[in-house]
Image (cartoon, rainbow, N blue to C red):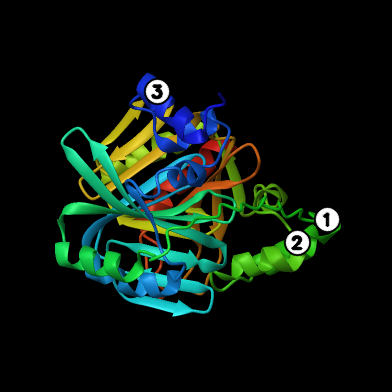
């Protein structure tokens, strides 16, 4: 008798009880959302696809852990959802701890999930895109609002637990990356007034982000070895410099602003393991690392950007700042050391 996907997953869990669901899905050649769907009616419940309304209720959950990831990096930040705003298919959550840029056009499935761990159970709300990839997850903590969680569950768990898992393939946009447009592209880059305008510039010229950096080598973009990138993180930790770390996927960008303190390497994973912020980065999937300078009305802003072998942005890092305030001299000095190192 042919085993169902549910049977296959349960057997795999018996063989490898510590295997995470994302890795189990890869092992079974399915998407994570398909595995979750096999547990509907047990420890998984389908949510109404009212994602904008759900986001507006997230402050009621209290102190939680927000998780956003891509293929190479996991970003976990504890805090309270605050200042939620929704404008069509875009939304924001802007707080000192949980800081999100949300793109709802990719959101398709939502679940309430109860799980098990060594010291008890977990509760989470989990959201997936139209391809079945995880977009964002919200985990209950010991100090979350029990009343708030019950309120949100009651409001958004669907009365009809009938799930149709119709997934779509993600269409990879092919940028023109036309070399003849490089001079005018660089000219416009040189007069940027806001870092947010850079994305519009890429769209105008139909350049991929990595191609644009290749085009700007030694002018605005400076490739560095992976080892230098990891060394910079160590120096940031030792210097107590506050930074901003952006990690995203097509449906979400999650930002940590503050210190990074406890850094540990475990196999291919480079980890930040602080009380309110965790980062887990697959260093073996880093293909290129860049220091990138962008002129703004507040002066030059410097970022670290890392990409995988397919040109996907894994992570961006800036010195902590707000509009109207120049970047930290400490951050600029630290970054500039590595530009000079590559020039020598």
Task: Bin the neighbour count of mark 1 within 10 Å (Cα to Cα): few under 14, some 14-19, many 20 and up.
Answer: few
* CB within 8 Å, label 2 to label 3: no
Tell me the mark number nearer the camera, choosing from 3 and 1: 3
Q: In whole angstroms, how far apart are the C-alphas of marks 2 and 1?
A: 8 Å
Give the mark, 2 or 3, whose residue is nearer the N terminus.
Answer: 2
Disc number placed over residue 220 in the picture, else none: none
Residue 290 vertical position relative to residue 146 in the rendered view, above or below: above
Kindly identify the residue that appears in the image at 27 percent across and 61 percent down. 97
The tag earlier along the polypeptide, 3 or 1, is 1
Front: mark 2 or 1: 2
Q: Which residue is mark 1?
A: 178
- The percent position of residue 157, horizontal first and vertical second, equals 35, 64
Q: Position of residue 202 (x, y in %)?
A: 68, 63
Q: Which mark is residue 267?
A: 3
Q: Helix, strand, or loop for circle 2?
A: loop
Q: Residue at x 33, y 27 (%)?
A: 18
Rendered view: 117 above or below 317: above
How far is mark 3 from mark 1, CA to CA? Answer: 40 Å
Give the residue number, with chain letter if any, for mark 2: 206
Q: Position of residue 14 (x, y in %)?
A: 36, 22
Answer with the quarter of the image where residue 344 lies: top right
Asked if disc 2 and disc 1 are in contact, CB closer than 8 Å, the reply is yes
Locate residue 41, reporting x and y percent: 36, 50
Q: Residues within 10 Å of mark 3 (few under 14, many from 20)?
A: few
Q: Is residue 268 above or below residue 307?
A: above
| Residue depicted at x 38% and y 66% | 159
């Amino acid at each position: 008798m042919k085993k169902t996907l549910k049977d296959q997953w349960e057997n795999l869990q018996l063989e490898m009880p510590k295997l995470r669901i994302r890795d189990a899905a890869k092992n079974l050649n399915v998407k994570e959302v398909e595995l979750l769907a096999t547990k509907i009616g047990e420890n998984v419940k389908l949510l109404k696809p009212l994602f904008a309304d759900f986001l507006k209720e997230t402050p009621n959950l209290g102190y939680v852990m927000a998780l956003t990831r891509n293929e190479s990096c996991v970003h976990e930040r504890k805090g309270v959802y605050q200042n939620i705003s929704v404008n069509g298919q875009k939304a924001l959550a802007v707080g000192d701890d949980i800081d999100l840029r949300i793109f709802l056009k990719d959101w398709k499935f939502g679940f309430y999930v109860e799980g098990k761990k060594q010291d008890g159970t977990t509760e989470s709300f989990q959201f997936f895109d139209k391809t079945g990839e995880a977009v964002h997850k919200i985990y209950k903590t010991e100090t979350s609002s029990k009343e708030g969680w019950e309120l949100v569950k009651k409001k958004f768990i669907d009365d009809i637990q009938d799930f149709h898992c119709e997934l779509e393939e993600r269409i990879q946009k092919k940028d023109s990356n036309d070399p003849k447009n490089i001079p005018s592209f660089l000219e416009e880059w040189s007069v940027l007034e806001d870092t947010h305008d850079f994305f519009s510039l890429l769209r105008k010229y139909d350049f991929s982000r990595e191609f644009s950096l290749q085009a700007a080598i030694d002018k605005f973009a400076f490739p560095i070895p992976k080892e230098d990138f990891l060394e910079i993180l160590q120096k940031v930790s030792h210097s107590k410099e506050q930074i901003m770390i952006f990690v995203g996927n097509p449906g979400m960008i999650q930002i940590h602003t503050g210190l990074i303190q406890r850094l540990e390497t475990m196999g291919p994973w480079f980890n930040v393991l602080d009380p309110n912020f965790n980062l887990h980065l697959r260093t073996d999937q880093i293909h290129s690392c860049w220091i990138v300078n962008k002129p703004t009305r507040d002066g030059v802003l410097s970022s670290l950007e890392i990409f995988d072998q397919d040109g996907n942005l894994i992570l961006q890092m800036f010195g902590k700042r707000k509009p109207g305030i120049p970047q930290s001299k400490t951050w600029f000095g630290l970054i500039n050391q590595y530009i000079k190192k590559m020039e020598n």
